[in-house]
Structure formats: structure tokens, C-alpha cells
Image (cartoon, rainbow, N blue to C red):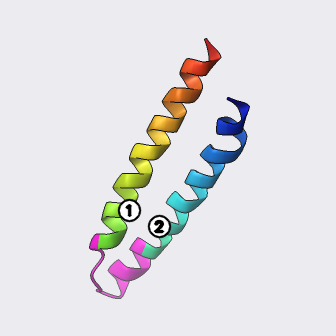
Amino acid sequence: MDLLLFFFLPLIGMLWFLNLVTLIKKIKEDKACQNQIILGATLSFIFIGVFMFWIVGLY
């Protein structure tokens, strides 16, 4: 369970941040950003799932 906390959560957080930066850049350039929106939703789902598994593993 420590692997989830120390590897997967920071990795997903980093991908989440990079996706947010790309989304903001594309919005400023007035380009299509559907892929970033879908990727952000998917990363949010994965982040919440991994976090829930980590919380359950504590007890």
C-alpha cells in the first residue's frame, strides 16, 4: 500500500498538472481542447480510485 502513496499518487498528480497546463495553453490559443478535458476526467477518476484504495488499506 505504500507503493500507492509514494509512487502512484505523485505520478497521477504530476500528469494531472501537466494536463491542466496544456489545457490552459490550448484555451489561450483558442484551439480544440476536448482531449485534455477527457484526459483530466480520467485522471481524476484514477486519482480518486487510488486514494480510496490507499485509505481502505490503512484500516
Mark 1, secondary structure of its residue:
helix
Picture residue at 39% right of the left edge, 44% below the top:
45
Q: Amino acid at mark 1?
A: Leu
Kindly report which numbered mark, 1 or 2, lies closer to the viewer in this rendering: 1
Rounded to the nearest whole Å, what is the CA distance between mark 1 and mark 2?
7 Å
The spot of residue 33 in percent (x, y) is 30, 75
**The magenta stretch spans residue 25:** yes
Q: Amino acid at mark 2?
A: Asn
Q: Residues within 10 Å of mark 2 (few under 14, many from 20)?
A: some
Tag of residue 19: 2
Task: Read off the magenta span.
Answer: 23-34
Q: How many marks?
A: 2
Labels 1 and 2: the sequence-earlier one: 2
The spot of residue 29 in percent (x, y) is 35, 88
Residue where numbered disc 1 is placed: 39
Picture residue at 29% right of the left edge, 86% below the top:
30
The spot of residue 26 in percent (x, y) is 37, 81
Q: Quadrant of the C terminus?
A: top right
Q: State if disc 2 and disc 1 touch (CB < 8 Å).
A: yes
Picture residue at 56% right of the left edge, 23% below the top:
55
